[in-house]
Image (cartoon, rainbow, N blue to C red):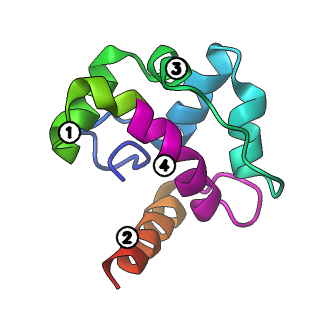
Amino acid sequence: MSLLSSKDTSVGGAGGLGGLIQAFQSQGLGDAVASWVGGGPNQPVSPSQMTSALGPETLSQFAAKAGIGAGDAGSVLAALLPTLVNQITPQGKAPEGDALEGALGSLLSGFMR
């Protein structure tokens, strides 16, 4: 959740979901991330594409926070991130500010059940 949050800067800095979208767009993966936000099927990304988009420092931060090996971070995020982004963008657009934090909170509470 820290990777998607604009308030929790412990993974990926303060960019939140908007920064994540920009990172993927800058690596030529705009269509993939747009599919996660949009209503259609989620396009997959490979672990190496995840590493290219987010960078090794962000993946290392994620791995440390998630309690997994740094070498596994790209694979884990490639499997989870499309679904997570899709879940917090049900209206087909990226929420911002308090709306984003509320969506992340709702998603997290759903996992806790």
Measured along the vertical axis of the image, is residue 80 above or below residue 19? below
Give percent across and percent down for residue 57: 28, 18
Give percent across and percent down for residue 95: 61, 57
Quadrant in the picture for residue 22: top right
Measured along the vertical axis of the image, is residue 101 above or below residue 80? below
Q: Which label lies toward us, 1 or 3? A: 1
Q: Are marks 1 and 3 in contact (CB under 8 Å)?
A: no
The residue at which mark 1 appears reads as: 68
**Three-letter residue code for mark 3:** Ala
Marks 4/3: CA–CA distance: 15 Å
* Circle on res. 53: 3
**Which residue appears at 61% of the width and 25% of the height?**
24
Q: Is residue 12 among the parts visible in the rendering?
A: no
**Three-letter residue code for mark 1:** Ile
The residue at which mark 2 appears reads as: 108
The residue at which mark 4 appears reads as: 80
Mark 3 residue crowding within 10 angstroms, few (<14) / some (14–19) / many (20+): many
- Whether residue 68 is in magenta: the answer is no
Secondary structure found at label 2: helix
